[in-house]
C-alpha cells in the first residue's frame, strides 16, 4: 500500500513539476523574470491540490488516481498559455483564471468530504431537472442575459459574467441518470423492425422528443448550437447505455440533424457558421461579418506550429481572436506543435477512459448511468471544440474543459471530475474476503442476531397461541356445563349403579371385555347396543330402564374394577 501511494504521489509531483517548468520557461522568454503574483498564486494552487489529494486518500481511498494528475497537467498547460497571451495583450486573464482555480479546488475539497455516497443525488432528480432548466434558460431573462458572439448564453452578475449552461449540464445529468434508471425496462422494449433496425415503441419516444424539443429550444432562443448538441448527445448516449439499443443512437442523430437543418434555414447565425465550415477560404465568406476569419487565423496558427511547435513564448497566438478561450487549442498547436496537441488529446483520453472503466465496473445502475453521462458530456465537449477548430464539424462556441479561460467552465468541470472520483471510489472498492476471520466473525454475528430474533418471535407466537387456547378452553368448559355430552363412569361391580352410564343425547360406547389380568387387555367382538339401535326397535329409553326384561345386558359380574384400554380407571 505504501508503494502504491508513493507511485500515486509521484504522478501528482510530476504534473506539478511539468507545469512549473512551463511557467518558468514562458516567463523567462517573455518577461525575463518570474512575477511574484504568479508565484504566490501557483503556491496556493499547489497546496490546494495536495490537500485535495490527501482528502481523497482519507475519504475516497479507492478513487481513481490517474484522473487528478491529468486534470492538473491540462490546467497547467491552459493557464500557461493564457498567461502567455496576457504578455502580448497586456491583460490579466491568467491571474483571474488561477483565482477561479483556487475556488474550484475548495469546492472540490468540500464535495469530497461531504458527498460520501453519490446515490444521495438520486433523491433530488426532479429538483435537479428544475434547477437545470432554470439555469439553462436564465440568459433569456431581460436585463440578466448577455449576448456574446451572436449567442445569448451568458448572464452578468455585477462585474462578473457567468455561463450557466456549464452548471446546467451537471443537474440535467443527475435527472437523466435517475429517470433512465427508473424507466430503462420500458425504454428497452423494442417495437417494429425497419431495415434490420429494431425501432422503439411509439409511446416510448416521449422522453427523446421532450429532450429534442428542449435542445431545439436552446438552439432557437439562444442561438447556441454547441450547448444544444451537448445536451442532446448526452441524453442519447445515456439512453443507449440504459437500454443497449443502437436504434436510439440512429434516431437521435437523425433527429438532431433534422433540427440543425431547420435551424440553418431559420437563423442567420447558424447558417454563417455552416458556410464558414464548408467554404472557409472563400474571400466572400472570409470578409463578411461573422465569417471565417477567426477560423482561418486559427488554422494558420496550427500550421505555423509544425511538428514540435515554436516553443513557449516564441509564437504569436494572440493574433487569433479568442485565443485564450474558444481557440486555446489552436494556441497549443502553435507553440507546442502537433506533439503538444497529441499529448493534450492523450490526457483527455486517459480521463475519459478512466471514467468509462468506472462506469463499467460500478454495479449500481444509477452510478453507471451518471458516470456514463458525465464522461460522454466531457467527450462530446472536447470533440466539438477540437472538431470545430480542425474543420471536422462547424464551430459550436463551446470551451475546452480545464484549459480555456472562464470561471464557469473551470468550476463546472472540476465538480464533474470530483463526481467521477466519488463514483470511482465505489466502483474500485474491493469486495470483502469470504475467508477472512473478520468476515467470518461478522457473518456469525449476523446469523446469531438473526437466530435470536427468530427465537424471540417464535416464543412470542407460542405465548400468544397458548393464551388463545386457554381462552378457548375456558369457553369450552363453560359450554360443556350447558350442553349434553356423553360421559362414561366406571364403577365397582358391588355397587348398585350400573358400570356404565350415558346421558340423553349420548351414544353407548363400544365396550370391550378384558381378561382378568389388568395388564393384558384383550379386545372383544361383542358391542353394547346404542340408543340409536334401540330407537330403531321402537323402544323408549325410559321403558328400557324400567323393564327388567329389557335388551340391556347386565353389568359385568367381576367384582374388581376394570381397567379401560388406554390406562384410565
Image: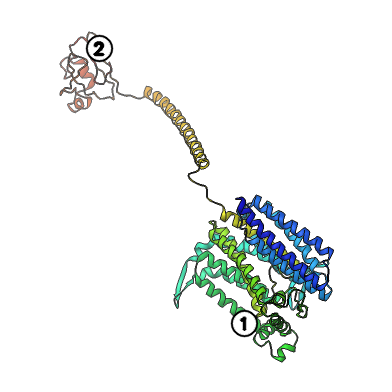
* Looking at the image, residue 32 lies above or below residue 449: below
* Looking at the image, residue 5 lies above or below residue 486: below
| 529 horizontally vs 15: left or right | left
Single out the residue that lies furthest toward the top.
494
| 503 horizontally vs 431: left or right | left
* Looking at the image, residue 444 lies above or below residue 421: above
Task: Please identify the quadrant where the C terminus is shown.
Answer: top left
- Splitting the image into 4 quarters, where does residue 205 fall? bottom right
Q: Which mark is residue 123?
A: none
- Splitting the image into 4 quarters, where does residue 105 fall? bottom right
Confirm whether residue 127 shows in the render.
no
Q: Which mark is residue 261?
A: 1
Badge 1: few (under 14), some or many (20 or more) residues near its Cα, within 10 Å? few
Badge 2: few (under 14), some or many (20 or more) residues near its Cα, within 10 Å? few
Front: mark 2 or 1: 1
User: Which residue is drawn at the image coordinates 67% and 64% (left, top)?
Assistant: 71
Amino acid at each position: 500500500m505504501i508503494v502504491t501511494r508513493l507511485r500515486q504521489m509521484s504522478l501528482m509531483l510530476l504534473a506539478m513539476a511539468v507545469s512549473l517548468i512551463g511557467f518558468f520557461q514562458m516567463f523567462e522568454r517573455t518577461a525575463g523574470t518570474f512575477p511574484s503574483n504568479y508565484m504566490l498564486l501557483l503556491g496556493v494552487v499547489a497546496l490546494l491540490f495536495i490537500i485535495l489529494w490527501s482528502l481523497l486518500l482519507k475519504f475516497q481511498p479507492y478513487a481513481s488516481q490517474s484522473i487528478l494528475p491529468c486534470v492538473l497537467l491540462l490546467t497547467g498547460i491552459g493557464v500557461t498559455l493564457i498567461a502567455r497571451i496576457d504578455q502580448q495583450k497586456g491583460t490579466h486573464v491568467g491571474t483571474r483564471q488561477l483565482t477561479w482555480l483556487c475556488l474550484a479546488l475548495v469546492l472540490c475539497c468540500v464535495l469530497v468530504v461531504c458527498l460520501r455516497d453519490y446515490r444521495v443525488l438520486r433523491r433530488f432528480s426532479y429538483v435537479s431537472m428544475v434547477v437545470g432548466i432554470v439555469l439553462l434558460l436564465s440568459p433569456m431573462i431581460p436585463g440578466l442575459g448577455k449576448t456574446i458572439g451572436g449567442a445569448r448564453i451568458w448572464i452578468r452578475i455585477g462585474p462578473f459574467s457567468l455561463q450557466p449552461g456549464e452548471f446546467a449540464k451537471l443537474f440535467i445529468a443527475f435527472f437523466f441518470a435517475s429517470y433512465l434508471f427508473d424507466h430503462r425496462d420500458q425504454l428497452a422494449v423494442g417495437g417494429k423492425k425497419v431495415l434490420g433496425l429494431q425501432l422503439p415503441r411509439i409511446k416510448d419516444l416521449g422522453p427523446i422528443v421532450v429532450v429534442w424539443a428542449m435542445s431545439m429550444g436552446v438552439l432557437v432562443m439562444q442561438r447556441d448550437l454547441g450547448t444544444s448538441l451537448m445536451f442532446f448527445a448526452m441524453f442519447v448516449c445515456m439512453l443507449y447505455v440504459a437500454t443497449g439499443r443502437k436504434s436510439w443512437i440512429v434516431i437521435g442523430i437523425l433527429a438532431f440533424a433534422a433540427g440543425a437543418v431547420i435551424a440553418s434555414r431559420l437563423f442567420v447565425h447558424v447558417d454563417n457558421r455552416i458556410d464558414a465550415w464548408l467554404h472557409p477560404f472563400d474571400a466572400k465568406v472570409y470578409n463578411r461579418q461573422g465569417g471565417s476569419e477567426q477560423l482561418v487565423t486559427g488554422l494558420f496558427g496550427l500550421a505555423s506550429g509544425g511538428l514540435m511547435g515554436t516553443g513557449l513564448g516564441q509564437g504569436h497566438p494572440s493574433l487569433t481572436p479568442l485565443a485564450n478561450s474558444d481557440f486555446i487549442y489552436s494556441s497549443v498547436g502553435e507553440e507546442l506543435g502537433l506533439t503538444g496537441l497529441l499529448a493534450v488529446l492523450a490526457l483527455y483520453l486517459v480521463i475519459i477512459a478512466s471514467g468509462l472503466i468506472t462506469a463499467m465496473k460500478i454495479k449500481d445502475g444509477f452510478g453507471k448511468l451518471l458516470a456514463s453521462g458525465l464522461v460522454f458530456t466531457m467527450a462530446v465537449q472536447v470533440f466539438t471544440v477540437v472538431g470545430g477548430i480542425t474543420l471536422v464539424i462547424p464551430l459550436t462556441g463551446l470551451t475546452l474543459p480545464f484549459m480555456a479561460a472562464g470561471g464557469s467552465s473551470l468550476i463546472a468541470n472540476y465538480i464533474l471530475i470530483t463526481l467521477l472520483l466519488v463514483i470511482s471510489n465505489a466502483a474500485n472498492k474491493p469486495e470483502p474476503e469470504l475467508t477472512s476471520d473478520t468476515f467470518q466473525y461478522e457473518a456469525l454475528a449476523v446469523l446469531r442476531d438473526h437466530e435470536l430474533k427468530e427465537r424471540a418471535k417464535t416464543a412470542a407466537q407460542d405465548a400468544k397461541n397458548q393464551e388463545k387456547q386457554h381462552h378457548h378452553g375456558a369457553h369450552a368448559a363453560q359450554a360443556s356445563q350447558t350442553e349434553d355430552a356423553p360421559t362414561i363412569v366406571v364403577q365397582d361391580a358391588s355397587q348398585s349403579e350400573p358400570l356404565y352410564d350415558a346421558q340423553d343425547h349420548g351414544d353407548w360406547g363400544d365396550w370391550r371385555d378384558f381378561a382378568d389380568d389388568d395388564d393384558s387387555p384383550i379386545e372383544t367382538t361383542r358391542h353394547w347396543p346404542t340408543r340409536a339401535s334401540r330407537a330403531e326397535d321402537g323402544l323408549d329409553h325410559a321403558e328400557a330402564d324400567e323393564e327388567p326384561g329389557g335388551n340391556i345386558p347386565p353389568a359385568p359380574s367381576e367384582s374388581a374394577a376394570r381397567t379401560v384400554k388406554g390406562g384410565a380407571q
